[in-house]
Image: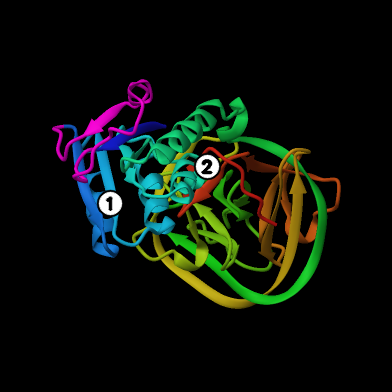
Amino acid sequence: MEVWLDFTTGKNFSDIDSALIENVQRQWHGESKDVAEVAIDGFRGQEEATSLVGLVDWILLRCSDWTMIPLENIISASRGTGTRIAAAVSSSDDITGAGFALEHGVDAVLIPPKIDLLNYSLAVSNQVASKERTPDQVQSVLQYSEVTDIAAVGIGDRVCVDLIDTLELGEGLLIGSTANAMVMVHGETVPSEYVPTRPFRVNAGAVHSYCLMADQTTKYLSELVSGDKVSVINLRGTLRHSTVGRVKIEKRPFLLVKYSDGRVSGQAALQQAETIRLVGDEGLVSVTNINVGDRVLTRMSAGMRHIGRELDGVMNER
């Protein structure tokens, strides 16, 4: 995290040791070709800042009433775009909040001419720089996880996702109660003596569940609408995009299937019906026939998400 000094305040830095000033990365005089300054006075300010992501090198945020939520949203939107975020702060609490927002923090803090804030900012900057990150925090690959529990949990709102194209045998959607532990729910492409196939449909589960979208973000099943693009995945882990044509929500009985790979644990609330299938290590298996100890195909990650976007960091969801 860089530390910038704000020379637009009309105050001088005569009480700050010149050696400390040499440790800052920028002396801010109000404008620079590589920086777009945005005032965050409400939602419109957040929208303006977000619209600049990917178009400028730096976005400098000034909040009239310091709040973390807009900052977190803009940090989340900027990840991987090349745009870096700076925040004007005026207290040690704000420096800490900005430096560790979403466990990533801003790329720079802009501080007024106060020796205590400069010292504190430099200390937080060193903490951010030395923060350890493990290589597997953002890994997300298909793997088999062991079923640890399965139980009936009553009646709830079930979501069927109907796509505008046909699913092949071996394709489905990634669904989960937690975004870092999703299970592959197979499409209704398998013939049954009870009901005809619906090769465009995935009976995806309860309304609270996450679904992996085409852009690798997640959405709650309750948020899906016609026109949304989701990620369809096959047994080899190959992804393709498909568009939602319709979403059906109806009252149905549910089973809660819990699973773990020994490192990350997850669960999915799925309709209690023979036609809802997961992918076991010996082929497709109906949720009504799954037993503790069985293995099912999952997508596990040690990362976290904010508004659906995957980030490095730790999140504990149960």
* On screen, residue 110 above or below 42: above
User: x and y percent of residue 261 in the render?
Assistant: 75, 39
* On screen, residue 318 above or below 154: above
Compared across the picture, whether 264 is left or right of 246 comes to right
At 53% across and 61% down in the image, what residue appears? 198
User: x and y percent of residue 197 in the render?
Assistant: 57, 61
Look at the image and give the residue range highlighted in magenta: 7-33
Q: Quadrant of the C terminus?
A: bottom right
At 60% across and 38% down in the image, what residue appears? 235
Q: Which residue, given by chain and number where applicable, does mark 1 sit on?
A: 62
- Closer-to-camera residue (285/217): 217
Compared across the picture, whether 206 is left or right of 63 comes to right
Q: Is residue 56 magenta?
A: no
Q: How many marks?
A: 2
- Closer-to-camera residue (22/150): 22
At 65% across and 76% down in the image, what residue appears? 156
Could you classify mark 1 by the number of other residues whose Cα lies within 10 Å: few (under 14), some (14-19), or many (20 or more)? some
Quarter-of-image position of residue 30: top left
Q: Which residue, given by chain and number where applicable, does mark 2 sit on?
A: 103
**Residue 296: which disc?**
none
Does any portion of residue 164 appear in the rendered image? no
Prevailing secondary structure of the magenta residues: loop
Q: Residue type at mark 2: give it.
A: Glu
User: x and y percent of residue 316 in the render?
Assistant: 66, 51
Q: Is residue 16 magenta?
A: yes
Q: Secondary structure at mark 2?
A: helix
User: x and y percent of residue 39 in the render?
Assistant: 23, 55
